[in-house]
Image (cartoon, grey):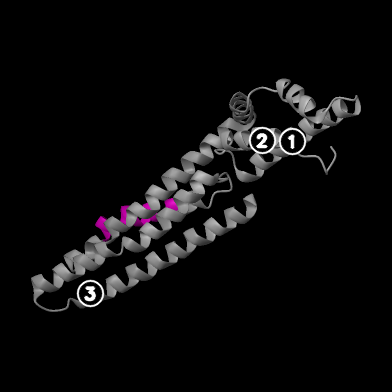
Amino acid sequence: MPRDITHPLIEDYLDKLNKGLKNLPNSERRQYIFEVRDHIYNQLNEKINQGMNIDQAVQNTLCEFLPPNQLAKEILQESQGDDGFFSNRGDIFFHYGLIATVGSFGGLSIPVYKGELNVGVILPFIISLIIGILLLNSKVITLNERQLKNLKWVSRILIGFLSVPLSFFSIRIIKDNSINFFSLNYLIILILADLLVYMFLRKLFYHQQLENY
């Protein structure tokens, strides 16, 4: 492929194909785009060498390829066929991991409101938090752009979620007409745990982003 030849029609075709493959991991999507680009420009170069003018050569070359949306569908089907089980499992791990990780903090906030510790009540949520972190840390997961955005959004929501135990603490103060020191100490531990999970999600986001790029 000649490095000094580009054409807006070809670049527009590749841009549409790239958008059609947005659900693939970035590294995999870039590889497909590179291969299609290379194939198109190689064929274009052959036609130009045969004496065809570049505009006609571009039109003839693109006619030999499927429309970008149809080609994207075939590539996605091929990708699913190659490792669909692992891809689907990774998607399931990601969504369940996020739900388990973030949702567990609601249940873990209950002792702040109660003013006392009941291990039987919070144990399922502790287990849920651990399972969620393990799922998100699974090597099966390779995040695409949509999932990266979701991960970034959820990590921010996690900070806002601190309003739940803080509200419970305020209610506890109103009920007792004084500070419940168990609730205070537990609240501090919960805030630290929330911040640690937030840092974990942000680290996971940047790690996956670097892998994709």
- Residue 127 painted magenta: yes
**Residue shown at the point (62%, 45%) measured from the top left:** 26
10 Å neighbourhood of mark 3: few (<14), some, or many (≥20)? Answer: some
Residue type highlighted by circle 3: Phe
> Distance from label 2 to label 1 (Cα)?
7 Å
Counting residues from the start of the chain, the first of labels 1 and 3 encountered is 1
Q: Position of residue 146 (x, y in %)?
A: 49, 44
Residue type highlighted by circle 2: Leu
Q: Nearer the viewer, mark 1 or mark 3?
A: 1
Q: Is residue 98 left or right of residue 55?
A: left
Asked if the residue at tag 3 contacts the one at tag 1, i.e. Cβ–Cβ closer than 8 Å, the answer is no
The residue that disc 2 covers is 14
**Residue shown at the point (20%, 66%) measured from the top left:** 167
The residue that disc 3 covers is 182
Q: Position of residue 192 (x, y in %)?
A: 38, 70
The disc placed on residue 12 is: none
Q: Position of residue 178 (x, y in %)?
A: 12, 79
10 Å neighbourhood of mark 2: few (<14), some, or many (≥20)? Answer: some
> Dot 3: what SS?
helix
Counting residues from the start of the chain, the first of labels 2 and 3 encountered is 2
The residue that disc 1 covers is 37
Q: Which residues are magenta?
A: 119-132
Asked if the residue at tag 1 contacts the one at tag 2, i.e. Cβ–Cβ closer than 8 Å, the answer is yes
